[in-house]
Amino acid sequence: MKEKRMNKNIFSSLRWIFLVSKRFARVDRKGRSAATSVLATLGIGFGVMALIVVMSIMNGFQMSFIDSILEISSYHLRVENLNTSNAPSLQQFCQNNERIINVSPFYEAQALMTGSRGGENAVIIRAVDPLIYVQDAGFRKELRLISGRFTMDSPDSIVIGNTLANHLGVKLGDQVDLLVMSGGSDVALFSEDRTFTVSGIFTSGYREINSSYCFVNFEAAALYFGKDSKLIWGLKLKNYNHDAAVSSKLKKAFPDAEISAWRDYNKSFFGVLRIEKNMLLLIVMLIFVVVAVNIYNGMRRLVYERRSEIAVLSALGARESEVKLIFIMKGLLMGGVGAVSGVILGLIISLNTDVVFKVMSDILYFFQYIFTAITAPENLSYIQMNSSYNIYAEIPARIFPSEVFGIAVFGLLSPFIAAWTASRNVLKMSIAEVLHNE
């Protein structure tokens, strides 16, 4: 019974606090506090929206690199120096582990490739099973063929990146030669007999892969890589963040094998991407600092303007904590409206970045055309659409729910902290003194 009465009292107290806070938000004597509230709410909304859009585009930009590296180059886990007799056991282990979706063996070597037209480029040659393009969905998604097929029916077939093909000056059906090649003592360092025919040209989301990677079959590896070439097993996981857990199980099952995770591969590059993202996040979050300062100043002014109402409420029995909650509630309302509207707008824009950038391009072109038509009509023929917006429109936004939630919470906390700080000394003047002055 006491608990019910206590809950009822708390509910009643919160109810009148909410009603008074709402009344303070609607009624304003001079209009300054109302304007500050509206501007603060807009600031929170646009800040949340800007953060979500910026982080989504940055995620899409960075993940296009990371996905290509993980799916084509590094894999999620690598197993090296595995005894040949343990290969069936490794495949059985991968089949029984629900976190592993694919395992692919490959050989790798470095070479200096020359084209039939005189171009040359350092490359990484990877010998794989041609069926990888069919069996590995992630590999097929990131490695997009723009010419030919991912087929290596003969030892002299090779699939190369489009940037590498342009640098060498070769196209589908042309020949390339591995002039200088790494390997053991049984591999000739220089040779003009390692000739391959380009059977496919691919592109990916990472330029380094397009400019340096090429693929051959296992038969070519046996002919040119040498006896000392190591067989490497590349593992793909359902969630690449589970690499540590799967790696520990692999080490227990195969203690003699050398296991490395994607975090160790291109570690410096991933670190740079993370720093870039964090710095951009920090810069955009300064919006909330400015908004919080404005809310704090607005709340201090509101407290001063409402000193007579505060005195009356205190005289009627309102406790100091309840009076403070009136202003804190107002800050939460501003933060809630701003955060919710910002999240909605941010998600809409992030899911339609291609449309937004194209509309921006059209608007910019329209105003530029009108301005040129008025000031220099003879130069109208030189006005063109900005191609940069088309490039930006091709970047797929990637939305992470955890980041959206964190941004929304931060948008709520900044006005809450500002309102709480501003209301700490809400009853500095005595009730009698305030009422006497009024």
Image (tube, rainbow, N blue to C red):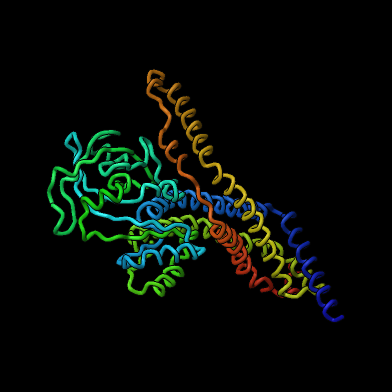
Residue that sits furthest to the right in the current view: 1
Give me the residue at 72% from left, 54% from top.
29
Q: Quadrant of the C terminus?
A: bottom right
Give me the residue at 32% from left, 44% from top.
210
Observer able to see residue 273? no
Q: Where is residue 153, by image quadrant?
A: top left
Residue that sits furthest to the top in the current view: 378
Which percent across, then down, holds residue 270? 37, 59
Q: Quadrant of the N terminus?
A: bottom right
- Left or right: 261 with respect to 30? left
Q: Where is residue 75, by image quadrant?
A: bottom left
Q: Nearer the viewer, residue 379 or 191?
A: 191
Residue 207 vertical placement versus 252 (above, below): above
Which percent across, then down, holds residue 132? 40, 49
Which percent across, then down, holds residue 137? 46, 49
Residue 70 vertical placement versus 216 (above, below): below
Give me the residue at 55% from left, 58% from top.
407
Observer able to see residue 331? yes
Give me the residue at 58% from left, 52% from top.
43
Which percent across, then down, holds residue 47? 55, 53
- Left or right: 220 with respect to 408? left
In this rendering, the count of numbered labels is 0
Q: Nearer the viewer, residue 306 or 69?
A: 69
